[in-house]
Image (tube, coloured by chain):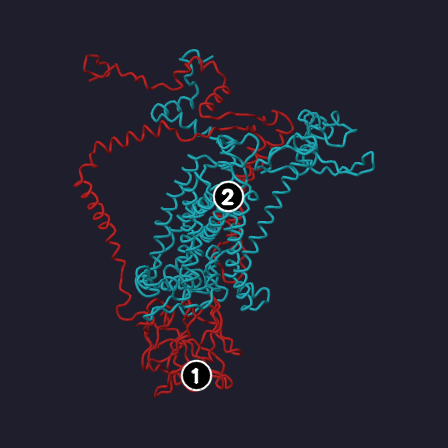
Chain colours: A cyan, B red
Amino acid sequence: MAATATAPGTPTTKIGKAALEVDDRLVVAGWTRRTLNKVFPDHWSFLLGEIALYSFIVLLLSGTYLTFFFDASMREVVYNGSYAPLRGVEMSAAYDSTLDLSFDVRGGLFMRQMHHWAALLFVASMVCHLLRIFFTGAFRRPRETNWFIGVTLLILSILEGFAGYSMPDDLLSGTGLRIMSAIILSIPVVGTWVHWAVFGGDYVGELIVGRLYIAHVLLIPAILLALIAVHLLILVKQKHTQFPGPGRTEHNVVGNRLFPTFAGKATGLLFIVFGVCAALGGLVQINPVWLWGPYNPAQVSSASQPDWYVMFLDGSSRLFPAWDLNLPGDYTIPALFWPTVLIAGIIFTLLLMYPVIERKLTGDTASHHLLQRPRDVPVRTSLGMMALSFYVILLISGGNDVVADKFNISLNAMTWIGRIGVIVVPPLVYVLTYRICLGLQMHDREVLEHGIETGVIRRLPHGEFIEVHQPLGPVDDHGHGQLAYGGAPVPKKMNQIGAARRAVRGFFSPIEEPSQVELEQRGEGRGLAAGEAGRELTSSGRPADGGRPQEPRD
Amino acid sequence: MSTHDTRPGSAGGADIAGPLHGGPDDDYTPEQLAAMSREELDLLGARYDGVEVLHVDPGPEPGSRLEKRAVRQVGWTWALAGLLAFAFLVVYIGSDWFLPDWHWAENDGDTWSTLFTPLLGLTMGLALTLVGVGLVLYTKKLLPHETAVQDKHDGSHFDRVTTGATLTSGYHNSGLARRKLLTRSLGFMGAGVGVMLIAPLGGLIKNPNKGNPLGQTSWSEGVRLVRDDGSPIRPGDQQPGSLETVFPAVPGGNRQSDAATMLIRLRPEQIAQDAPREGQEDFGYGDYVAYSKICTHAGCPVSLYEQETSRILCPCHQSQFDVTQGAKPIFGPATRSLPQLPITVDDEGFFVARSDYIEAVGPTYWNRERI
């Protein structure tokens, strides 16, 4: 052996020697080993946050590319590019450079659309991630800090998205900006002062695109990046939560080590997210600014909708009644203030403070690392569904003119459906969700107590017909299961507890020997054949020792 | 001083790690470690990190049909990804070289420019997705599946107490608890420097109440109503029931955010119902009325005029205004009527404004009523 020539353990390969050189200087072997050995639990819903992270990377890369060409200026120019219908039209340099970027930069349109799609995906995956965290109780102590950071990230991302799609200075973005100007003006006492500070004077001025630009490419992304870093550091420090299951406790994490399994899957997902953004960016048109034309305060097109994550505010503005509040001294709080500033403020404050609110209401201040199934926390689940239904009605109302048009419904009827729905539907959803949760809970307990329905009907000697139930664990004298509910999914079908052997692999033709699979399954106690030997044909059909519970399906 | 200097007072040659260095290197000598297999070392390190590998499902047996098939799947997926990446390069670089031009073309005859962006998306999107799919297939089908458990530690009491002691002794030694003058001046300094650093942001603040920027427009007595192209309008130009957007005849009037006005010629039956706002009965001219185009709700241009019902609809939030009732809001979130522009006809027979709007146009704000 080559190793005998040198001291024991001295690396002999080139890579090994290089690694030694690095560790001599940086002493990172211990830290690297700890990182590679870190265990991550495995569940599809844990990937939602990863999708948000990866689409953020797409945004950073594609956004940097766009800055090479975009001119954030409101200087008036005359368009003279490739797109003939707008040639000779006066427009701002921002819109002009957006058109150039789309029509005269090779692959520019592809990049612009990819950036826009990635932005939609970013916010959407954040919202899905938030719902997962909410409904499984992952925000409970000790993870409140990460919930606060997460909600802040969501709010900042919405602002970031608004700033982004307001920059091209086309007719649609100008309309959005005009509404934002009115929202700022509607703030009591300081509204006009804030407006003058943000816009540098009366609407629209000459500064706002430049200011949106620096906020969009530097200020907000820098804060987002810093908060994402803290979010992930806290996640690594606190370790990931996991669903309850065999061997899973409050004091461990069961799953795969970072290297190679988790790293492989995560990198795979990164590329898939990149790929989906690229495919959408090339194949599915989004925000064709050249069709909207340059911004003109006297023009608007019907069906002017913002990007989806701002639509709930558009919806609330459409539904809210015309209620100006006239105060003594001829002061006014405009009707626009309630649905945009106040309701949005209440929504996000409640969202942000939810961990604190729940802790106060339940008095639960213990640390939790095991997740809850939504059915086991019916009040929270119902509250969440109630809030979600409220949000979805606002979201749909944000496009109620399109719904009215496509489905041939009166526009005013759509407004009234939204107005009534936003008050009536959420409580109904609460009650319905609550009942569904209780029903699911009871069914879990019923299966634990009486076993799984096998579908086998048996006639007893005295003539009574019974359905044979398969208990999940030890039973008492009356045949009732003694297993307690552990917060993990309860198997409800015989196949889930190994009544059927697994399929032989192979798509067109089997690539395994069927007899080999049979043997392997028999060894694991799976399949009906495996249980043949121990079957009692004379009993009531309740074997004293039932099948074993399967790995939870989560 | 050289490292070989061993005289008293020099640090050379005698620099040995102190007794607290310790750690796993004391438990395992290099010889012991050298005697262990790779798998044993892996598990040993994992145990030091609190990780126990419970169960390993080995990957497919080397040389088995299962393995060959999985290797084929991963290999072809990645090969296809490479091929598509190459196709992307061909489309991206080759267009306008050995392939047709990619620039937008007015007549739709040029198929390539229509296909250029979709092809970029298709090739890059599929290439990247396949890279990811290949990786996932690799981990799922070829790597061993292990189930590992890692311990989760609660905070250490020892760490808390010792860290607390270090922090408090620093504070204690600083004497800040006793030296009241220092704490007070520190607070004063902190507040002063803090405010000083953010003070330059004051440059953003401007007074919105200087003059009356929100309450005034470019309209004033004798300013002609002109179309977007600058042409003036005579009373005979419009059909009854029609609407035209007009602007003040001042430089840049057609781009101002608050000046756009709708000139509406009412139909005879609309005139019969017409009920202008109090004190504004004479603001129209004949069968013509002029209302601000800027919505009183959120400032969008109210653009959709349905002359059969006399309603003007704002497409942003669906506020509806009735032009026969002084543009009063009759549905939706708007609370105020659209301001009416008093109009007349000048010596040459063209429409002119009699004055500016008598109230602020556009969205409501806090002190609107006071100016």
For label 1, the residue is B288
Q: Is residue A451 left or right of residue A377?
A: right
- Dot 1, crowdedness within 10 Å: few (<14), some or many (≥20)? many
- Kindly indicate the quadrant of the structure image that contains residue A525: top right
Proximity of marks 1 and 2: CB atoms separated by less than 8 Å: no
Q: Which of the two discs, 1 and 2, sits closer to the camera?
A: 2
Q: Position of residue A362 (x, y in %)?
A: 48, 44
Identify the residue at image location x=62%, y=46%. Answer: A439
Label disc, if present, on residue B119 of the rendered structure: none
- Kindly indicate the quadrant of the structure image that contains residue A548: top right
Count of marks, rendered view = 2
- Dot 2, crowdedness within 10 Å: few (<14), some or many (≥20)? some
Q: Position of residue A42 (x, y in %)?
A: 53, 35
Q: Position of residue A164 (x, y in %)?
A: 41, 54
What is the quadrant of the C terminus of chain A in the image?
A: top right
Identify the residue at image location x=52%, y=28%. Answer: B148
Label disc, if present, on residue A48 of the rendered structure: 2
Q: Is residue A405 left or right of residue B201?
A: right
Assign a secondary structure to mark 2.
Answer: helix
Q: Closer to the camera, A141 or A98?
A: A141
Q: CA distance from mark 1 to mark 2?
A: 59 Å
- Whether residue B116 is visible to the viewer of this picture, yes or no, is no
Q: Chain of mark 1?
A: B
